[in-house]
Amino acid sequence: MNLMANLLPAAAEIFLLVMVCFILIFDLLLKQNKIYTYLFVQLTLLGCSLITVGTHQHGVFYAFNGMFVDDLLSDVLKMLSYLGMSMVLVYSRQYLLLRGLFTGEFLVLALFALLGMNVMISASHFLTLYLGLELLSLSLYAMVALQRDSAIATEAAMKYFVLGALASGLLLYGMSMLYGATGSLELGAVSNAIHQGVQNKALLAFGLVFIVSGLAFKLGVVPFHMWVPDVYHGAPTAMTLLIGSVPKLAAFAFVVRILVEGLQSLVSDWSGMLMVLAIASMALGNLSAIAQTNIKRMFAYSTITHMGFMLLGLISGSIEGYGAAMFYTVVYMIMSLGGFGMIMMLSRAGFEADTLDDFKGLNQRSPWLAFMMMLLMLSMAGIPPTVGFYAKFSVLSAVVQAGYTWLAVVAVLFSLIGAFYYLRIIKLMYFDVPESHVPIVVESDTGLLMTLNGLGVLLLGMLPGTLMTICAVSVRQSLLLH
Amino acid sequence: MSFFDAVFYLFAILTTLAATGVIIARNPVHAALFLVLAFCSAAGIWMLLEAEFLAITLVLVYVGAVMVLFLFVVMMLDINLVKLKEGFWRWFPFGAVIAGLMVFEMVWVLGSRQISESSRAVVHAANYSNTKELGKLIYTQYVYPFELAAVVLLVAMVAAIALTLRRRSGVKSQNVSEQVKVKKADRLRIVKMHSESRAEGK
């Protein structure tokens, strides 16, 4: 019985790992056509989601001696990550096929990255948090470098690797300090120890600074953002899509597990640090994005801004704020999937549609795609009736409730500045003359997914209640606050 | 100061000096050798803490395998030392300030009394096996992170092969099974020829 109690909560992860190993071998037997591997991967994602739903239990369960936690938050985030990964693969299939990158290794590394994310999402121990992070990061480094003959991709991979290793070092250093102060690596025990009072306050504060710096590096918020534009720009767009979308869910879980589950007693210390990071990110991200001509770089700066905005929800230190931050992260994932997916749909063999000029007159070339892109851009800018508005609104209302009205005003001002470069894309698409008249070839599956993605942004914006409630309930049920 | 303390300080000073040597050595081979010294003295400190398994692993894996590979790479690459050292003095003040700050904070935080009193190493009996205890923990309490570490290694393997393996066309390579299966008839052609006498034609 003890064995089952340990294995059952982690059934989805175990299934995923077994399937990855199987696909790794299975793929070797296929000569050229990787479509079967691709279908297998999609089936694996479906199987994982069925298992996650099937093994869901009401309450918070710990397994493997408190290293693994199964709660509503982890189950919801895992389901969303399967969905996100599945969408990533659909969007990137044609793009990668045309560039000869649609290999078994890509699919296997993507699943390994997903496994890393799931480990992070349901970790309740510094050791598992760190191992999940490394599993995710290593897979992503390799994927960025997968296009070996591209100098720019290799450079991006090097930068990502070196700065990522530095960030991991900072995190480990911080974790070891917290271990020294509290005598435990388990988040619950760390939280209890701090709650009861730690003698060495200096050590605790020192560790917290390192942890927050490491987290900021991984989230890519100012002043630890330097890698984001280069990596987003240099990596093949399919890898950029993967880096920029699903891992944000894991990053959210990572931050919440450490700062809220582990260090909630120090909320007054870390919310100040996060405030500085958030304001700097919104300022620098929005202002730099205006100057970009490459749309991937522009989205990179927009990611920095969005991550800063997400941190605002955490600053409030309340359950409502954490729920709002989760809602924001989920919405951001959906929007960025659509945005990068659109770049890939407009690209073709030997041509990357990654500059702003490539979007000129899109309305004349493909009115439907232009409409979808307009919905996505309106959502990123936070204009009703799209869902981006509600994401921003819920975060801001949590900030105001926490008594930081000035902070909300600052955030709104920077969002206004940010609206400029999103609306500029709409202007380019509808009021400019197209520079090329090459017909846009859209595969039926990506076209359908883009339609669902764009309309989903609109529909969620009209009926945001369900998703908001899911986020709020899962945070409330899962995070035990002192 | 007891003998134990003296040995500890010897190893500690050696580690610090060797680590400094790694950074300031002009020749990369010397830097690598300094790193070997740093690993060996660090292994000595592990030994003092009765962690003999970790000490031996550190020497076997890092000194034995990793550093040898490292030396190979250093020898095979033509590293331009002048270019490598460029900008060292320009960034030195900046780095020195950061390093100084870190040292100050470390001394301030780690030097406080709570740390030094509560974390004294436990002395075990003579028949205590560090390796056995580690093994017991790894396969019971820490089995989940242990498996995850194995997956991380698998990812590293997949990534290394995906990034370096190139299939070039027209490469002449051996096919051992074909070689073994070969028969005399495949290689040797016996041509029937009439023997000729010496005298003929004269």
Image (cartoon, coloured by chain):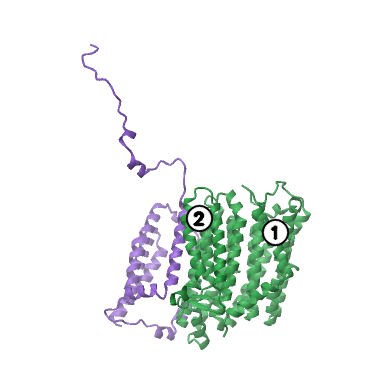
Q: Which residue is mark 2?
A: A105
State which mark lies toward you, 1 or 2: 1
Residue B91 visible from this viewpoint: no
Quarter of the picture holding the C terminus of chain B: top left
**Residue at the far left in the pictured view:** B199
Q: Nearer the viewer, residue A49 or A210?
A: A49
Give the percent coordinates (x, y) of residue B98.
50, 71
Q: Chain of mark 2?
A: A
Chain A, colour shown: green
Give the percent coordinates (x, y) of residue A200.
48, 85
On screen, residue B110 versus residue A344, left or right, reads left
Report helix, strand or loop for mark 2: helix
Give the percent coordinates (x, y) of residue A467.
67, 72
Q: Nearer the viewer, residue B75 or A433?
A: A433
Identify the residue shown where x is 55% and y is 58%. A156
Q: Quadrant of residue A271?
A: bottom right
In primary-sequence order, the first of circles 1 and 2 is 2
On screen, residue B158 versus residue A348, left or right, reads left
Q: Which mark is residue A451?
A: 1
Q: As shown in the figure, which amino acid type bears the numbered disc 2?
A: Glu
Q: CA distance from mark 1 to mark 2?
A: 29 Å
Residue B187 vs B102, above or below: the answer is above
Identify the residue shown where x is 44% and y is 58%. B157
Chain letter of the purple region: B
Circle 2 Cα neighbour tier, 10 Å, few/some/many (<14 / 14–19 / ≥20): many
Q: Chain of mark 1?
A: A
Count of numbered labels shown in the rendering: 2
Quarter of the picture holding the N terminus of chain B: bottom left
Give the percent coordinates (x, y) of residue A258.
54, 76
Report helix, strand or loop for mark 1: helix
Circle 1 Cα neighbour tier, 10 Å, few/some/many (<14 / 14–19 / ≥20): some
